[in-house]
Amino acid sequence: MSQAEEIYCSDGSKPIYQHHPVAAVIGAASSQVSVMVASMLQLFKVPQISYSSTGTELSEKPRFAYFSRVVPPDNFQATAMAHVVSALGWSYVHAIAVTGAYGERGIDSFRAAAAELGVCIDGDVHKVNRRWTDIQF
C-alpha cells in the first residue's frame, strides 16, 4: 500500500487516529528475548513485565532498570532444589543439566546453593540436549 492510498474503516468512514504512547510491554516469554527487548525498551524508559522469563541476568537492576517479572529467577529454583537434597539427607549427588544458558547457569546456582548446605556435587555434570531422542539417552 502506498502512502497516497486512503485507508477506510469497514463502514466506509475514515479512521480517527489517536496517538497513545506505549505505557509498558508485557513479555517476552523467554529470557533470551527479554534481555534483547529490555535493552531496547530501557532507552525509551518503557517498563517491561515478563510472565515467564526466569534468567538470573535479568535481576541486574543497573542493566535492566525497567524490567520486572512475575516469576522468580532461576537461582531461586536452584536454591530450593539444594534444600530438598539437604532435607533428604543426601550429602553427595550427581547433576544432569540441559545444554545452553538455562542449564549451565542453573547448575552454577545449584552448585553454589548446595555447597552452602554442605552437599557435594559430582564434578562431572552430565549435559543433555533437549532435542535428543530416546536412542541418544
Image (tube, rainbow, N blue to C red):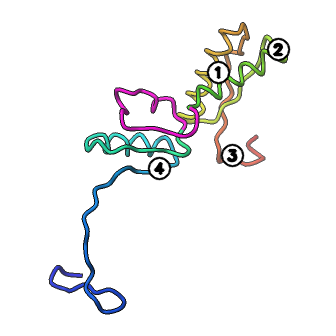
Looking at the image, which residue sits at the far bottom? 12
> How far apart are the two marked residues, 3 and 1, measured between alpha carbons?
23 Å
Q: Residue at x 60, y 35 (%)?
A: 99
Instruction: Establish if 34 lies above or below 73.
Output: below
Which residue was labeled with disc 1?
110
> How far apart are the two marked residues, 3 and 4, measured between alpha carbons?
29 Å
* Residue mark closest to the camera, 4 vs 1: 4
Q: Secondary structure at mark 3?
A: loop
Task: Name the N-terminal-most of marks 4 and 1.
Answer: 4
Q: Residue at x 37, y 33 (%)?
A: 64
Q: Secondary structure at mark 4?
A: loop
Which residue was labeled with disc 4?
27
Residue 67 in the figure: left or right of residue 84? left
Answer whether labels 3 and 4 touch (C-beta < 8 Å): no
Q: Is residue 8 magenta?
A: no
Task: Name the N-terminal-most of marks 2 and 4.
Answer: 4
Answer whether labels 3 and 2 touch (C-beta < 8 Å): no
Q: Secondary structure at mark 1?
A: helix
Q: Nearer the viewer, residue 135 or 47?
A: 47
Q: Secondary structure at mark 2?
A: loop
Which residue was labeled with disc 3?
132
Callout 2 amino acid: Trp
Which residue was labeled with disc 2?
90
Task: Name the N-terminal-most of marks 3 and 4.
Answer: 4
Task: Name the N-terminal-most of marks 1 and 2.
Answer: 2
Q: Which residues are magenta?
A: 54-72
Callout 1 amino acid: Phe
Pointer 3 local density, CA inside 10 Å: few below 14, some 14–19, many at least 20: few
Callout 3 amino acid: Trp
Task: Name the N-terminal-most of marks 3 and 2.
Answer: 2
